[in-house]
Image: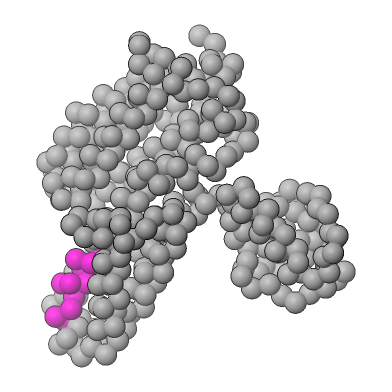
């Protein structure tokens, strides 16, 4: 039997393994030790979810390919999916708010159930306690409870009751999208990103890619600010999604340099400022941006983007070049 992980052949001690469940348990434990998650696997080209292991004798198997992902990637993609669902749902509910269809309550109940599961899973992966973590003026646990109460109300709602529930549903979905966004920009996400170590060649490539993207991201931020100023909130939000993805990759890459290359970013200097200080500045601005977005303060959002984040990113390429030079892969 050939074992592969993410399409790469690997060797494994099969001592004591006789069933497929034994092998999956071993790969799951291996993944957990490396802060990875076993998502799915194929047995001779037949796909299975990680939690649905067929009862097969290993002697009957030729090739097993296990697909694993980092926790950070799972959290990021799942939160993005949840936020996109909220946005689509809000847009739809607003379009039918005055005359909801008879089946919308059932669909809304199913959607709220799924969102509750997704948000709970993300909180668990991040190690965030929903009872102590807050969004706006209440805990995330209280938000989840309110979503569950609304879900229960939707199950048996009449058309009139459904119409009365829609404004509350829209508000809850908007808040849920805000919670996903807050978690993506928070310290727990940053810590998880740093723990998900890439190989040296992947980090070197990622550094170069991030540096090359900086001019486009600066322009992207300027256009997001202009879109907010023009009242084009949806366009601005789409642009911010691209920027959040960029920052996610930058933080992940720069945070992994020290454990992989033994280069301390505190010692990487540009004009008397360390890379640690530069990263703290960017994170502080992101926290500030998240706060004003939660309060729907569009004027402040636009000002932070145009007058604070753009200047903060203007010399980021110099820091990355200094980091590359410290690693030994860049020469002026």
Q: Give how far across and how far down residue 186 sits, in percent.
A: 35, 45
In the rendered view, tell whether residue 330 sits above or below residue 160.
Answer: above
Q: Give how far across and how far down residue 170 sits, in percent.
A: 21, 68
In the rendered view, tell whether residue 196 sits above or below residue 176.
Answer: above
What type of secondary structure mainly makes up the magenta span? Answer: helix
Quarter of the rendering containing residue 56: bottom right
Residue 26 can be seen, yes or no: yes
Question: How many badges with numbers are in the image?
Answer: 0
Viewer-side residue, 188 vs 205: 188
In the rendered view, tell whether residue 216 sits above or below residue 91.
Answer: above
Q: Give how far across and how far down residue 68 sits, in percent.
A: 62, 54
Residue at 32% x, 26% y is: 313
Residue at 18% x, 57% y is: 137
112 on left or right of 209: left
| 167 is within the stretch colored magenta | yes
109 on left or right of 188: left
Viewer-side residue, 324 vs 291: 291
303 on left or right of 57: left
Q: What stretch is highlighted in magenta?
A: 163-173
| 16 is within the stretch colored magenta | no
Residue 206 can be seen, yes or no: no
**Colouring convention used in this rendered image of the protein:** one colour
Viewer-side residue, 97 vs 36: 36
Residue at 35% x, 16% y is: 273
**In which quadrant is the N terminus drawn?**
bottom right
In the rendered view, tell whether residue 258 sits above or below residue 244.
Answer: above
Residue at 54% x, 11% y is: 331
54 on left or right of 202: right
Quarter of the rendering containing residue 178: bottom left
Q: Give how far across and how far down residue 309 sits, in percent.
A: 26, 31
């Amino acid at each position: 039997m050939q074992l592969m992980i993410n399409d790469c052949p690997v060797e494994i001690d099969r001592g004591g393994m006789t069933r497929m469940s034994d092998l999956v348990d071993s790969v799951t434990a291996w993944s957990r030790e490396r802060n990875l998650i076993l998502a799915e696997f194929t047995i001779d080209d037949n796909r299975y979810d990680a939690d649905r292991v067929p009862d097969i004798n290993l002697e009957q198997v030729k090739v097993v390919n296990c697909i694993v992902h980092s926790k950070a990637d799972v959290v990021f993609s799942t939160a993005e999916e949840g936020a996109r669902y909220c946005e689509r749902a809000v847009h739809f509910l607003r379009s039918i708010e005055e005359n909801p269809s008879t089946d919308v309550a059932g669909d809304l109940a199913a959607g709220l159930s799924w969102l509750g599961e997704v948000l709970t899973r993300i909180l668990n992966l991040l190690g965030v306690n929903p009872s102590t973590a807050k969004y706006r003026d209440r805990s995330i646990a209280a938000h989840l409870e309110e979503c569950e109460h609304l879900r229960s109300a939707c199950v048996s709602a009449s058309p009139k009751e459904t119409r009365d529930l829609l404004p509350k549903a829209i508000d809850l979905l908007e808040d849920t999208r805000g919670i996903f966004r807050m978690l993506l920009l928070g310290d727990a996400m940053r810590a998880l990103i740093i723990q998900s170590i890439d190989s040296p060649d992947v980090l070197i490539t990622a550094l170069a890619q991030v540096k090359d993207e900086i001019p486009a991201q600066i322009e992207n931020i300027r256009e997001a600010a202009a879109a907010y100023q023009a009242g084009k909130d949806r366009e601005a939000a789409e642009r911010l999604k691209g920027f959040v993805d960029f920052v996610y990759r930058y933080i992940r890459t720069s945070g992994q340099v020290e454990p992989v290359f033994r280069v301390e970013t505190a010692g990487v200097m540009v004009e008397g400022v360390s890379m640690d200080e530069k990263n703290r500045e960017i994170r502080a601005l992101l926290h500030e941006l998240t706060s004003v977005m939660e309060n729907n303060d569009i004027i402040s959002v636009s000002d932070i983007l145009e007058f604070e984040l753009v200047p903060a990113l203007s010399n980021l390429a110099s820091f990355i070049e200094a980091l590359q030079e410290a690693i030994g892969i860049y020469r002026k």
